[in-house]
Image (cartoon, helix red, strand yellow):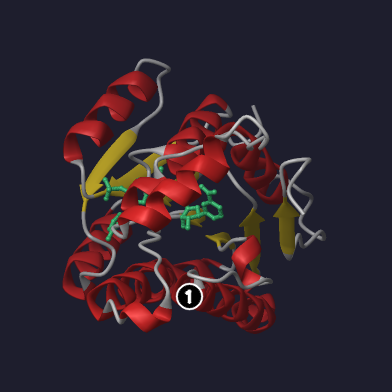
Amino acid sequence: MKLSGKTAWITGASSGIGRATARLLAAEGADLVISARREERLQQLADEIGKQGRKVTIATVDVSDRQGMQTVAEMIASLGGVDILINNAGTMPISPIINGRVDEWEQMIDTNIKGVLYAINGVYPGMAERKQGHIVNISSVAARLTYPSAGVYAGTKHAVRAISDTLRKEAIRYGVRVTDIQPGSVDTELPDSIVHEKIRAAVKGNMYGEDMLNLKPEDIANAILYAITQPAHVDVSELLIRPLVQE
Ligand code: NDP
């Protein structure tokens, strides 16, 4: 097993990419801290993974809650820290900017940018002190491209990519590696977070339509596993993974 003796914190582990990554990392021997808001989902996952003999700790937290994230970080420090952070929690309530859905913009900024930073802040100093660690941030193909109706979402993901690349350069001296993972369209619950009804229907139509071949969450989990299991001299800075037919 490639991750025996390692501990990973996975945010947004209650569904989609986070859950698939939790399953894969546990199958490779990692102990886990899994976090999200839906405790029941986390408990189900913990029960499943616990049966494989892995140690799983649940943290029910909203990543945009600065104090709550600090509390999780303190809990993690009391366990001895983590070797790997998978900064995955995210939301996508997209709409055209002309609609002025400011609450949804703030939700994306608070979750997708601030949440990522709070998690980094929670574990990076400990990793730097121990001179080893790996931070994986999940941005998106929307960290490179923009799409009508997805301006704020793409803005948050461009920010995650910029933060990842800056952190990568800063963290080299501390022996901490940083990877930015950029998924294309993945078949998950993410479109359910779109509040704008027409846009939600359009995105779901695109994602689940017969013409569109989506990635599976497991495809992204495989990319993450690749990034975090390379020899110490290899830095996988970023990975862009698209379904075959996505332009
Ligand atoms: P899902 O909706 O299936 O999963 C999102 C996860 O994030 C859930 O576990 C959810 O848990 C958690 N989450 C959302 N908001 C919060 C919050 N405020 N606090 C804590 N946890 C939160 O979507 P995906 O698996 O697709 O998304 C995972 C990541 O991948 C996201 O960052 C997304 O932007 C990114 N991505 C997804 C793509 C796709 O096509 N699916 C493409 C490119 C990037 P809970 O609701 O229980 O809190």
Residue 173 locus on image (x, y percent): 67, 80
From the image, tell me which residue sits under label 1.
156
Please state, as top left, top right, bottom left or bottom right, where the C terminus lies in the image. bottom right
Question: Which residue type does callout 1 highlight?
Answer: Thr
Q: Quadrant of residue 199?
A: bottom left
Q: Is residue 19 above or below residue 115?
A: above
Q: Is residue 58 above or below residue 4?
A: below
Residue 126 locus on image (x, y percent): 43, 69
Evaluate whether residue 97 shows in this view.
Answer: yes
Give the residue displayed 39% in from the left and 68% down from the top.
Answer: 95
Residue 246 locus on image (x, y percent): 73, 48
Give the residue displayed 64% in from the left and 57% down from the top.
Answer: 181
Please state, as top left, top right, bottom left or bottom right, where the N terminus lies in the image. top right
Q: Is residue 181 above or below residue 101?
A: above
101 left or right, relative to 124 = left
235 left or right, relative to 45 = right
User: Residue 152 versus residue 98: which sits nearer the camera?
Assistant: 98
Outermost residue on the front side: it is 198
Residue 223 locus on image (x, y percent): 69, 44
Q: Is residue 117 above or below residue 13?
A: below
Evaluate whether residue 80 shows in this view.
Answer: no
233 left or right, relative to 120 = right
Q: Secondary structure at mark 1?
A: helix
User: Residue 95 versus residue 221: which sits nearer the camera?
Assistant: 95
